[in-house]
Amino acid sequence: MTSYKDLGLVNTKDMFAKAVKGGYAIPAYNFNNMEQMQAIIQACVETKSPVILQVSSGARKYANKNLLRNMARGAVEYAHELGCDIPIVLHLDHGDSFELCVDCIESGFSSVMIDGSHLSYDENVALTKKVCDYAHKHDVTVEGELGVLAGVEDDVSAEESHYTKPEEVQDFVKKTGVDSLAISIGTSHGRQKFKPEQCTKNADGVLIPPPLAFDILAEIEKKLPGFPIVLHGSSSVPVEYVKEIEKFGGKLSDSVGIPEEQLRKAAKSAVCKINIDSDGRLAMTAAIRKVLFEKPDEFDPRKYLGPARDELKKLYMHKNVNVLGSANRV
Ligand code: G3H
Ligand code: 13P
Ligand code: ZN
């Protein structure tokens, strides 16, 4: 058993309490390779932001669980070397079984998500409680989910989203003991968050999505005052990246994300963790495509992964400062 405390990591408890009180959200950035990790740490150190490093089960399979865990340990040392000991959480994103959560807790994760959102309410309660009971013995925090996001949630996929029912949240939190709750108010995973027919178009032909269900968020806040709420599927899918990727040979039709001003508004409420993965994928892909298109003779990976890392860092700094409000909170 490796405790996260021995790796220099923290759980989400204090981080979330401060974020709820301060009216901002902690960035939860997914990673599965070294350049992403470097960009996240550089950006969060430079903006003095706490951070959640998220690992999906797919990322664990891709990168190897021991390597990822040791990268998180390295991230703590790297932040220190860069001059700021920012609080760092290592979090399992979309855990789909008790066994996976236990494996992560035993190998140094400080926080886990158990995603029982596709189960019946009672099954979700039972599974989430089982994970909480185990995790809390090790001072690890747990995120549960109520309501279903459309799109792919790792191995779990859903065609349609189902908003969280505010009348269920108090009972769920009480019965399970979760430390935070992911809700569904209209966000979804990936780069196509809405169907084109759900959107309007602006003068430049850019798709404008329908607004998030802030009325449901307000009802949930009323039922659970001060309780940490999590938003998944919160990439904004910047049109500049989509255009850049298409300019250099990519094809990403009908891409649409969550507008930044809506995320800013959410971050000022009880939403204290905002999950972003797709925007990082877009930033990296745009930078890599550009280099390979403009320099067809380039074959040193550092020459395209380096610019990708720089673009990622720029993106994360922008999110921390201008969207989540997490900058200068350390
Ligand atoms: O919510 C899903 C995250 O973006 C992780 O995606 O399962 O492809 O690693 P992944
Ligand atoms: P995006 O696909 O919008 O980046 O969402 C990521 C996410 O929710 C990870 O859990
Ligand atoms: Zn998610």
Image (cartoon, rainbow, N blue to C red):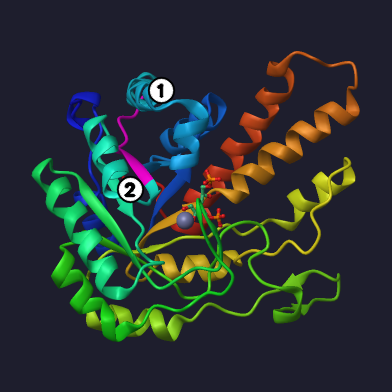
Question: Which residue is pictured at 69% across the width and 56% down the height?
Answer: 238
Q: Nearer the viewer, residue 275 or 44?
A: 275
Q: Which residue is mark 2?
A: 329
The answer to whether 322 is drawn above or below residue 75 in the figure is below
Is residue 50 among what the camera can see? no
**Residue 277 in view:** yes
Crowding at label 1, few (<14), some or many (≥20) Cα neighbours within 10 Å? few
Say what amino acid the circle numbered 1 marks. Answer: Leu
Range of the magenta residues? 82-92
Provide the residue designation for mark 1.
82
Local packing at callout 2 (Cα closer than 10 Å; few below 14, some 14-19, many 20+) is some
Decide whether residue 84 is among the magenta residues: yes
Q: Label 1 CB, ligand 2: below 8 Å? A: no
Residue at 33% of width from left, 20% of height from top?
77
Where is residue 178, by image quadrant? bottom left
Q: Where does the image place residue 34, in percent across and percent down from the top left?
A: 52, 24
Tell me which amino acid carries mark 2.
Arg
Residue 262's place in the image compared with 71, above or below, is below
Q: Earlier in the sequence, mark 1 or mark 2?
A: 1
SS at mark 1? helix
Foreground: 288 or 267? Answer: 288
Image quarter where the C terminus lies is: top left
201 left or right of 61 in image? right
